[in-house]
Image: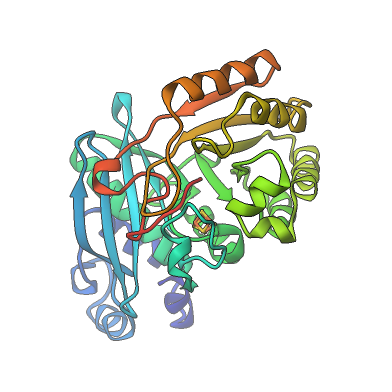
Amino acid sequence: MGEVLTELGQPRYRVEQAVRAQASGADDWHQVTSFSKDLRATMAERLPLWSVVPTDRQVSRDGTIKWGLALEDGAVVECVLIAHARGRRTLCVSSQVGCALACRFCATGAMGFGRDLTPWEIVDQALLARREAEREGARLTNVVFMGMGEPLQNLDAVLAACDELHRDAPGLGISARQIAISTAGWVPGITRLADHPLPVRLAISLHAADDQTRGALMPINARYPIANLLAECRRYCDRTGRRVFIEYLLLEGVNDSPADAHRLADLLRDGRFHVNLIEYNPTDGDYRASSRDRRERFVNALEDAGIQASVRRSRGADVDAACGQLAAGGRTG
Ligand code: SF4
């Protein structure tokens, strides 16, 4: 939308007027009354006001909302709004249609790659979610790039979207520290992200502590093995002064033994990382979630080795909105 308004010679505040209209419920350009009638008609000819149109909305027992969203070319992506205490909401956005990286545990990976989303297709997911949150008297406070796609393979659009998400009213005004970009380990993107001025969070989907196990789960490991990936993360920490979040999906009998925990602790010993352990949500694949017992032993082994870890509870699994289930599809970290 911004590009078209710029092409038409319109000033930046027109984008803000359009965003304000979307936030207050406008469904098409004819309802953007701050525009002249002619400009409304021109914009309506060029593109829809909303670049994503909800085609499906499912609400989980825990209040998580999952939308199926049609894009202008008929492609479909999904996004998920998660409720927290004190009226806070986190949106998990998609950055691509499908994904090229084919992680074995991920429903999106099984779809293959469709195309990159544009910045506005990402921002509109957040505008839609903000409208929903406000309807419930809540606030959209966090955005995580953990939906469909590998965000670092669409980094220009993702960074442009982050700038819009962060921009103050009538933008979404989301603090940079509440925006997280999660990657399966696309190293050139980490290098670029370190130079971006907006201090967003970086999360790495590691999911294994040795190359053989990780390679079997995530084909990208053949290109960027663990040592290269973590070396780039350390450079990122040095350059930005920020910690990196390590996402680790616990899969029964695959990567969840105390020996795996010790290997993980050895990799991360220098204190620049925080580990998030994720409960797996079965898709149609070959993996199972770790039992509670194995999970607890893994956490204890990590803690004994001096590594801080949080366990991320699963949300929205009954409507396939949890990690790894989007697209239906989705991603896991
Ligand atoms: S986990 Fe992420 S990077 Fe891997 S296939 Fe799924 S969407 Fe792509």
* Camera-nearest residue between 327 and 164: 327
At 56% from the left edge and 37% from the top edge, which residue is drawn? Answer: 248
Quarter of the view holding residue 186: bottom right
Seen in the image, is 188 located left or right of residue 112?
right
Residue 8 percent coordinates (x, y): 43, 82
Image coloring type: rainbow
Q: Is residue 150 above or below residue 211?
A: below
- Please indicate, yes or no, whether residue 253 appears anywhere in the rendered image: yes
Q: Is residue 141 above or below residue 283?
A: above
Q: Residue at x 61, y 59 (%)?
A: 152
Given the current orientation, which residue lies at the most extreme top position? 304
Q: State the quadrant of the N terminus.
A: bottom left
In this picture, is 9 found above or below 11?
below
Which residue is depicted at the point 65% across and 27% down? 261
Q: Is residue 184 visible?
A: no
* Residue positioned 51% across, 45% down in the render: 333
Q: Based on the displayed image, in which of its 4 quarters is residue 87 positioned? A: top left
- All told, the count of numbered labels is 0
x, y percentage for residue 108? 43, 60
Between 278 and 162, the one lying in front of the other is 278
Residue 252 percent coordinates (x, y) = 49, 35
Pick the residue in front: 331 or 132.
331
Q: Return the x and y of residue 207 as percentages of the image width and height.
A: 59, 42
